[in-house]
Image: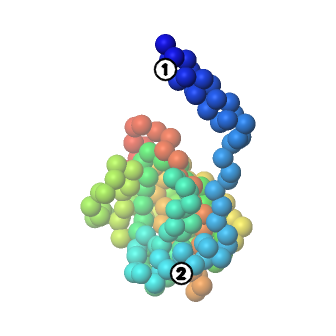
């Protein structure tokens, strides 16, 4: 009985302490840390998906250059929000992915190295925000001379794939 009383007191005290400590602090990375991590990723290898660093699940900072052909992709289950941080490029959205497709590595990723037919091409640059609905093909058909860096938020919003092709 004494053990049970001690356990109850310990649980009550830990709950009180947890309430007094408040919420955890925000995740934080300085601009210098972000830049250093991106530079390290870029130096490691060329990539058709660009280079990215993860801030938290679903939130990344991604950099692309024109030195590598970029994949055209669809996320059938997820919505993405891009906030262009620096640089510029031409982002094509909508239309249809050109076949053949690359091997699928996830149920939320369909990609091709052969671009998009149709769609709307927009010149995007620092400050722009884009919202890509699930199933929307998208592709950086061109990237400015200085590359493009953007924050990407990807949120899975559907249990059933949304595809328009």
Q: Please state if 46 lies on the left or on the right of 40 as rendered.
A: left
Marks 1,2: beta carbons within 8 A: no
Q: Which secondary structure lies at badge 1?
A: helix
Q: Earlier in the sequence, mark 1 or mark 2?
A: 1
Find residue 3 and name its label.
1
Q: Can residue 130 be seen?
A: no
Residue at 48 percent across and 44 percent down: it is 156
95 or 19, nearer to the observer:
19
3D distance between C-alphas at marks 1 and 2: 56 Å
Q: Which residue is mark 2?
A: 39
Q: Can residue 44 be seen?
A: yes
Expressed as whole percent of the image width and height from the top left, the position of residue 24 reads 66, 47
Residue at 45 percent across and 49 percent down: it is 135
Q: Is residue 112 above or below residue 67?
A: above
Q: Which secondary structure lies at badge 2?
A: helix
Q: Quadrant of residue 152?
A: bottom right
């Amino acid at each position: 009985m004494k053990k049970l009383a001690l356990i109850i007191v310990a649980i009550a005290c830990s709950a009180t302490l947890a309430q007094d400590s408040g919420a955890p602090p925000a995740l934080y990375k300085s601009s210098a840390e972000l830049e250093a991590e991106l530079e390290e990723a870029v130096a490691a290898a060329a990539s058709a998906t660009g280079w990215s660093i993860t801030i938290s699940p679903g939130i990344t900072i991604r950099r692309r250059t024109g030195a590598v052909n970029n994949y055209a992709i669809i996320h059938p289950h997820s919505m993405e929000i891009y906030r262009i941080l620096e640089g510029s490029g031409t982002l094509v959205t909508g239309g249809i992915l050109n076949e053949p497709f690359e091997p699928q590595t996830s149920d939320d990723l369909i990609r091709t190295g052969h671009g998009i037919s149709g769609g709307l091409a927009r010149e995007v640059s620092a400050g722009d925000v884009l919202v890509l609905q699930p199933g929307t093909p998208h592709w950086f058909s061109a990237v400015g001379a200085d590359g493009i860096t953007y924050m990407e938020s990807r949120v899975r919003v559907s249990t059933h794939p949304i595809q328009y092709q």
